[in-house]
């Protein structure tokens, strides 16, 4: 019985949503021909400003500065980069307020729980 109560309003809502967009293309008795299934092509080539700029793959960078604590627990930031440190010995040396030089690479698409900074995979860490 509960299923009927939920499914009937759902079916009505879906039916009304289909009618609400006003698209009658291809409907019987319609004078509007159905839309072409050919892929659309962009009218303009992407400009330099609109293109996504990605850093070179595997590009190693060196950062020097003072580590700051992030807003989330166990998140460490250096020059707007979120430090991802997998080596426990390096992690022990990485404390907020420590002056360090790190080498590694930016990992743009990496998901983190830190909510700030560009992920930076640390390969070496040296205290200054």
Image (tube, rainbow, N blue to C red):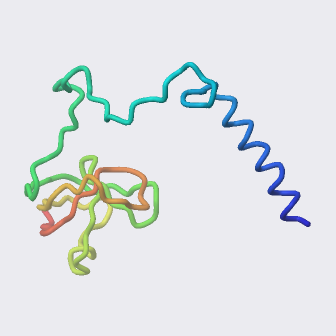
- Where residue 110 appears, as percent x and y from the top left, is 31, 59
Q: Quadrant of residue 19?
A: top right
The residue nearer to you, when weighing 111 against 36, is 36
Write the residue at 21% across / 74% down. 90
Relative to residue 25, is residue 46 drawn left or right? left
Write the residue at 22% across / 80% down. 89
Write the residue at 18% across / 38% down. 53
The single residue placed furthest to the right in the displayed view is 1
Relative to residue 112, is residue 53 drawn left or right? left
The residue nearer to you, when weighing 52 against 76, is 52
Q: Quadrant of residue 36?
A: top left
Q: Is residue 45 above or below residue 116?
A: above
The single residue placed furthest to the front in the displayed view is 29
Write the residue at 16% across / 26% down. 48
**The C terminus, quarter of image:** bottom left
- Where residue 44 appears, as percent x and y from the top left, is 22, 20
Q: Is residue 89 above or below residue 5?
A: below
- Where residue 74 appears, as percent x and y from the top left, is 40, 67
The residue nearer to you, when weighing 18 against 87, is 18
**The N terminus, quarter of image:** bottom right
- Where residue 33 appears, as percent x and y from the top left, is 49, 24
**Numbered disc total:** 0
Q: Quadrant of residue 30?
A: top right
The residue nearer to you, when weighing 32 against 41, is 32
């Amino acid at each position: 019985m509960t299923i009927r109560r939920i499914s009937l309003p759902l079916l009505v809502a879906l039916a009304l949503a289909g009618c609400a967009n006003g698209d009658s293309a291809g409907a019987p008795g319609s004078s509007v021909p159905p839309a072409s299934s050919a892929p659309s092509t962009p009218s303009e080539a992407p400009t330099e400003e609109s293109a996504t700029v990605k850093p070179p793959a595997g590009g190693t960078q060196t950062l020097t500065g003072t580590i700051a604590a992030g807003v989330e627990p166990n998140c460490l930031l250096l020059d707007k980069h979120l430090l991802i440190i997998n080596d426990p010995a390096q992690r022990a040396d990485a404390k907020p307020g420590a002056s360090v030089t790190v080498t590694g690479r930016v990992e743009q698409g990496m998901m983190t729980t830190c909510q700030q900074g560009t992920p930076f995979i640390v390969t070496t860490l040296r205290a200054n």
